[in-house]
């Protein structure tokens, strides 16, 4: 099994594990006070959103060619670090409060967790921009190479049509048409 495939499997397993952790947090939040529940569910929704972004990055990595996936790997790693940090922050804040929180405790936890989530979103956005730039550069290179190849083929085909025309006494257009009919 190649390195790309192993890397994808490792990241998918970790993503699945984190999804299970988010589901556990949701169940744990249901036992908190009403104010705390609102805040926890808000943070859990942010985690789910960050999870979806990470899942999307993994899907793009899976679609990437062998030479492009190395470039995407750094971005995926950064998104994973951000998601892992945000998840630990939410889990830590819920464990610290242990279901016995005051409104001021809940606000403090919300502020710390919100800051961690914002940092994760910012890193994910930066990673997406980097991936888009690298993908665009790769697409431009492919387009340039394709264009060069198309020009070379056109030049060679035109030369071949003129050579055939010279030997048969036909015009280059007639020779090109005959060549086209033969190829079909």
Image: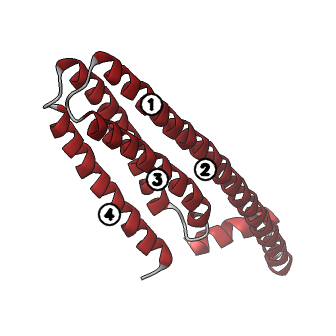
Image position of 156 (left or right of 95):
right
Q: Where is residue 152, by image quadrant? A: bottom right
Q: Where is residue 153, by image quadrant? A: bottom right
Q: Which residue is mark 2?
A: 131
Q: Residue at left 13%, top 31%?
A: 31
Q: Residue furthest right?
A: 166
Q: Position of residue 96 (x, y in %)?
A: 30, 38
Which is more N-terminal, label 2 or label 4?
Answer: 4
Q: Residue at left 29%, top 17%?
A: 103
Which class describes the residues within 10 Å of circle 1: few (<14), some (14-19), or many (20+)?
A: some
For discs 4 and 1, the disc positioned in front in the rendered view: 1
Q: Secondary structure at mark 2?
A: helix
In the drawing, what numbered circle is on residue 13? 4
Distance between the Cα atoms at labels 1 and 3? 19 Å
Distance between the Cα atoms at labels 4 and 2? 23 Å
Q: Is residue 148 above or below residue 29?
A: below
Q: Secondary structure at mark 3?
A: helix
Q: Secondary structure at mark 1?
A: helix
Q: Position of residue 136 (x, y in %)?
A: 66, 49
**Way the structure is coloured:** secondary structure
Distance between the Cα atoms at labels 2 and 3? 15 Å
Q: Position of residue 138 (x, y in %)?
A: 68, 57
Q: Which residue is mark 3?
A: 80
Question: Which quarter shows the C terminus?
Answer: bottom right
Image position of 107 (left or right of 142):
left
Q: Position of residue 71 (x, y in %)?
A: 62, 61
């Amino acid at each position: 099994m190649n390195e790309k495939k192993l890397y994808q499997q490792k990241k998918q397993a970790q993503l699945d594990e984190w999804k299970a952790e988010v589901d556990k947090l949701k169940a744990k939040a249901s036992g908190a006070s009403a104010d705390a529940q609102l805040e926890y569910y808000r943070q859990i929704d942010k985690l789910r959103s960050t999870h979806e972004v990470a899942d999307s990055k993994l899907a793009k990595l899976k679609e990437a060619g062998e030479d492009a996936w190395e470039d995407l790997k750094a971005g995926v790693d950064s998104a994973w670090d951000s998601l892992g940090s945000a998840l630990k922050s939410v889990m830590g804040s819920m464990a610290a409060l242990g279901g016995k929180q005051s409104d001021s405790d809940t606000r403090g936890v919300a502020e710390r967790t919100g800051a961690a989530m914002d940092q994760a979103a910012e890193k994910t956005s930066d990673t997406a921009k980097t991936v888009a730039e690298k993908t665009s550069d790769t697409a431009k290179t492919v387009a340039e190479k394709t264009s060069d190849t198309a020009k070379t083929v056109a030049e060679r085909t035109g030369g071949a049509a003129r050579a055939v025309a010279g030997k048969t006494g036909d015009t280059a257009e007639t020779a090109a048409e005959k060549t086209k009919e033969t190829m079909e």
